[in-house]
Image (cartoon, helix red, strand yellow):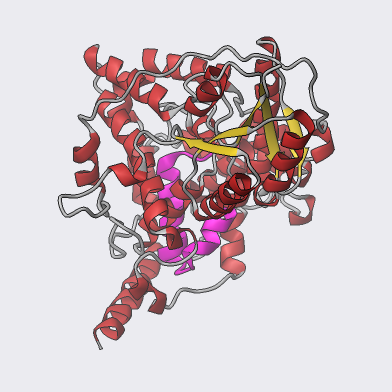
Amino acid sequence: MTAPTLFWFRRDLRLSDNPALTAAAKTGAPVLPVFILDPETEALGAAPRWRLGAGLRALSAGLEAVGSRLILRRGPALSVLRDLAEETGATTVHWGRLYDPTSLARDTALKTALTAAGLAAKSHAGHVLFEPWTVETGQGQFYKVYTPFWKAVRTRDLPSPLPRPRLAAPETWPRGDGLAEWGLGKDMNRGGAIVAAHANPGEDAAADRLAAFADGALDAYDADRDRLDRAGTSGLSENLSLGEISPRTCWFAGLRAMEEGKRGAETFLKEIVWRDFAHHLVYHTPHIVERNWRPEWDRFAWRGDSAAAERWRRGLTGEPVVDAAMREMYVTGRMHNRGRMLVASYLTKHLLTDWRIGLKWFEACLIDWDPASNAMGWQWSAGSGPDATPFFRIFNPATQAEKFDPMQIYRRRWVAEFSGDPGADALSYFDAEPKSWGLAPDAPYPKPLVDLKAGREAALAAYQDHRAQSAA
């Protein structure tokens, strides 16, 4: 028998358009798909870890449908892969590349160690449209501003998405853990069942979601994607996060939509490239995930955690659109992109709170959490990041709500106290939130944490002080 090939699934939980899996299959050797619950993966927040479990269940079923199976192992990746190679006689390991600093550090050390142990370690593209080292300015530098980045890649040719490969099975399978043994959803407590009703895990669900979007909301995407009261977005963020659909598949769907004359197609393509931009920045400037991208912001007088920040986390700021967005996240595991900008602006500007406090809460609560997009989004909103919105651009939640939720549909959907007759979504928040919070839908709605005008003026004053200190 030909020695089997190990394929290590990571954030590419799909069979279609998976270049690394296709490369493993093309060897003609039996392919042993494995997912490793290593310390880096165990460090995920509660909601991303829960969502990973749902994605692995779907992937396992998909593999079994084509005569294969998913081997689950727990432990340091290097130890697991070496053990599997010894047990099975495998001589090669394939995986798809990732670009965040935690993954890069692990994978670089792992590739060196596997090679030293006599194993061929082969990494492949697939998580982004364009590899980070392939997009450069005329001066040979990486792009720090999105618009020229978009112009540099928008006309590049990409190979068509790959079909599902045929996976040869071994005569015998190595042992694996049971998914339930890992307890990936335990930290969600009672909230897991609530979020599950809004999740769409798996490659097939992602493909169906993309097809429905292309046939429907994509045409009006440019106009409707910012509307809080409309289903104007693709909803694919949770699937892209775990690689249940490839960005290339989304890109080609956008190109087809452009050929069909759909008005929102180019904006959709720009959003896919925005995701690439985030991963390129994380690759080139890895400190973006934990430190101010612009070092001069290290001197800004951010406030630390506080009772006000806790009210923000619980959706009790007294600003209905902010609270609606925070509660939407707690119930669904996702948040409308316009809502993300509003809650981030409110925390970092009206409350002058360190953006990392918000970043960590999103890391705990989002089922579509992505290390690059989360970091860039928060630093964009705070003004401390690349191509960021200026700090003095302070979203007014009240006027934003009037513009993007004019009939109060979104606010009434998610804030029970704001509605005389709350619906299931608003009430679900009280089923999902920890009992220790002691919240109730019939409690009085809280008064605003801060007067919006006074909060804006305080933020601008802090910014002026920061500029003066930086110039001194």
Find the magenta span and give its range.
Answer: 333-361
Residue 10 found in image quarter = top right
In the displayed structure, does residue 168 sit left or right of residue 126? Answer: right
Q: Nearer the viewer, residue 141 or 437?
A: 141
- In the rendered picture of this protein, how many numbered marks are placed on residues? 0
On the rendered image, what quadrant is the N terminus found in? Answer: top right
In the displayed structure, does residue 467 sit left or right of residue 103? Answer: left
Furthest residue in direction left, as rendered: 138
> Which residue is located at x 32 percent, y 22 percent?
254
In the displayed structure, does residue 356 sit left or right of residue 75? Answer: left
The answer to whether residue 353 is magenta is yes
Q: Position of residue 432 (x, y in %)?
A: 71, 41
Residue 79 visible here: yes
Residue 446 visible here: no
On the rendered image, what quadrant is the C terminus found in? Answer: bottom left
> Which residue is located at x 61 percent, y 49 percent?
116
Q: Nearer the viewer, residue 157 or 185?
A: 157
Q: Position of residue 195 (x, y in %)?
A: 66, 34
Furthest residue in direction bottom, as rendered: 472
Q: Position of residue 461 (x, y in %)?
A: 32, 77
Q: Nearer the viewer, residue 175 or 156?
A: 175
Look at the picture and state if 106 lies above or below 215.
Answer: below
Q: Nearer the viewer, residue 108 or 232?
A: 108
Q: Position of residue 339 (x, y in %)?
A: 44, 44
The answer to whether residue 34 is magenta is no
Look at the picture and state if 223 lies above or below 453.
Answer: above
> Which residue is located at x 24 percent, y 47 percent?
136
> Which residue is located at x 19 percent, y 45 percent?
148
The chief SS type of the magenta part is helix
Residue 286 found in image quarter = bottom left
